[in-house]
Image (tube, rainbow, N blue to C red):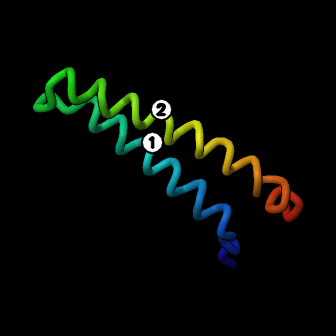
């Protein structure tokens, strides 16, 4: 029987995929360092916001565990 995937599960997977993609971009040898630094600075803000957004809904979905 397949386990029911909650919206929170989908969000966590999307978050994992995003982190993986960011890592790949930062390792891209074709991008110059200044572009990588600029990108990383913006992504840091995105990650911080994602953590806070996760805290808002995590408790609700954790009740189903």
Mark 1 crowd level (few <14, some 14–19, many ≥20, 10 Å Cα): some
Task: Write down the residue under mark 1.
Answer: 19
Name which residue lies at 15% across and 31% down: 31
- Where residue 28 appears, as percent x and y from the top left, is 20, 32
Name which residue lies at 83% across and 56% down: 62
Name which residue lies at 50% across and 36% down: 45
Task: Indicate the quadrant where residue 59 lies.
Answer: bottom right
Kindly report which numbered mark, 1 or 2, lies closer to the viewer in this rendering: 2
Q: Which mark is residue 44?
A: 2
Residue contact at pointers 1 and 2, CB within 8 angstroms: no
Q: Is residue 34 above or below residue 43?
A: above
Q: Residue 32 vs residue 8: left or right?
A: left
SS type, badge 1? helix
Q: Residue 33 vs residue 24: left or right?
A: left
Q: CA distance from mark 1 to mark 2?
A: 11 Å
Q: Quadrant of the N terminus?
A: bottom right
- Where residue 49 appears, as percent x and y from the top left, is 59, 43
Q: Is residue 64 above or below residue 43?
A: below
SS type, badge 2? helix
Task: Indicate the quadrant where residue 51 lies.
Answer: top right
Seen as rendered, the residue at the extreme bottom is 1
Seen as rendered, the residue at the extreme right is 63
Q: Residue 32 vs residue 41: left or right?
A: left
């Amino acid at each position: 029987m397949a386990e029911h995937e909650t919206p929170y599960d989908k969000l966590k997977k999307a978050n994992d995929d995003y982190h993986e993609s960011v890592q790949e971009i930062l390792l891209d040898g074709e991008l110059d360092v200044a572009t990588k630094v600029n990108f990383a600075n913006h992504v840091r803000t995105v990650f911080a916001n994602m953590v806070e957004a996760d805290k808002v809904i995590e408790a609700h979905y954790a009740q189903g565990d």
